[in-house]
Amino acid sequence: MERDELVSPEVARALRPWFSGITLGARPVLPDAPAVLEQPDHGTTLAWRTGSADPYDVVVMGPRTRARYYVGRPGRDCLQLRFRPGRAAEFLGLPLRDLADRAVAVAELDSEPLRTFARLITDGDSSPGPESPRARLRSLARAVPAALPARPDREGLRRRIVAEAMAMLAAGDGSPPTPVGLVARHLNVSERHLRTVFVDGVGLTPSRFVRIDRVRTVLARIDQTLPELATEAGYYDQSHMGADFRRVMGTTPHAFATRRWPAVEACAAAEADSDHHGLVPQPHSMT
């Protein structure tokens, strides 16, 4: 994890086993973007509104399978902690299969570990009131070991299967993703078992994970030429990339790069998650 003014080494050590990164604030994918973009994302995050004094003012944000475009509007920044592969289901004590495209408040989620975690955030806090992001992270780091007792060995096995499968399916080396059948054989499990464990641990099927991962690769390198993008993201050809991108982003890669985005929406999210939409936060990565 980067040593910066937000995350101390002590906090990083406590959070690193569970979370791969921390985000705070917002920045556009492209300079002079015509709208606020909510990117597709195969990860699951915990999110707090900064400035809130309520430890239960936390939302679990499941995977997002489609991009959404919003009218820019002012709002409080959001502190988000992104789970490591396979860790979200273990943290919540729940499968993630029903969290795709949802942002669920603590009170609405039947997760005793999460409720315990939220309660422990304020234990021993002698100065009630809104916490700064740095103070909130210290509170989170203190609560993690107490809220998350040791899990059965099978939880670790399922987490390993999910993490290794995600690594094999992810884009990055310019080659097409490994077929699910080959991933299953590599992990010494049946293809059916892999799909079940993957959906429970990620919230998406392997094929949907691959689609979102490749589109995110294209978004991260959108300033490159389209043939380069198709190759680096592991598509068979530029046409294949365009079809996937349009399905997830609602427009073509060229139109997106030239800022011809789909019509924007007025954000109509519920109060519990309204401040968590439309953010592309600045990351503080954990390694």
Image: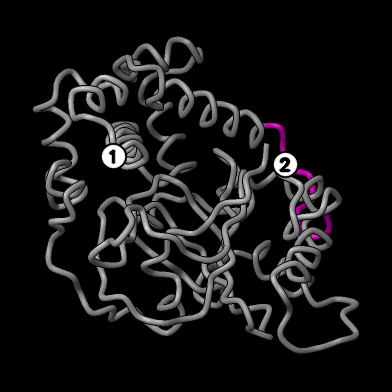
Indicate the secondary structure of the residue bearing disc 2.
Answer: loop
Q: Position of residue 45 (x, y in %)?
A: 53, 56
The quarter of the picture where the C terminus appears is top right
Q: Does 5 appear above or below 185?
A: below
Which range of residues does the magenta coloring cover?
145-153
Tag 1: amino acid = Ile
Q: Does 152 appear above or below 3?
A: above
Is any part of residue 211 visible from this angle?
yes
**Mark 1 neighbour class, 10 Å CA radius: few under 14, some 14 to 19, many 20 or more:** many
Write the residue at 41% across / 16% down: 183
Q: Is residue 3 toward the left or the right of residue 216 in the image?
A: right
In this view of the protein, which residue sits in the foreground, 129 or 285?
A: 285
Q: Is residue 150 magenta?
A: yes
Is any part of residue 205 visible from this angle?
no
Residue beneath label 1, please?
Answer: 222
Q: Is residue 23 toward the left or the right of residue 73 in the image?
A: right
Q: Which mark is residue 17?
A: 2
Q: Does 18 appear above or below 106?
A: above
Indicate the secondary structure of the residue bearing disc 1.
Answer: loop
Residue 211, by quadrant, is: top left
In this view of the protein, which residue sits in the foreground, 31 or 134?
A: 31
Write the residue at 37% across / 26% down: 171
How far, Cα to Cα, is label 2 from label 1? Answer: 32 Å
In this view of the protein, which residue sits in the foreground, 170 or 198?
A: 170
Counting residues from the N terminus, which is met first, the one under dot 2 or under dot 1?
2
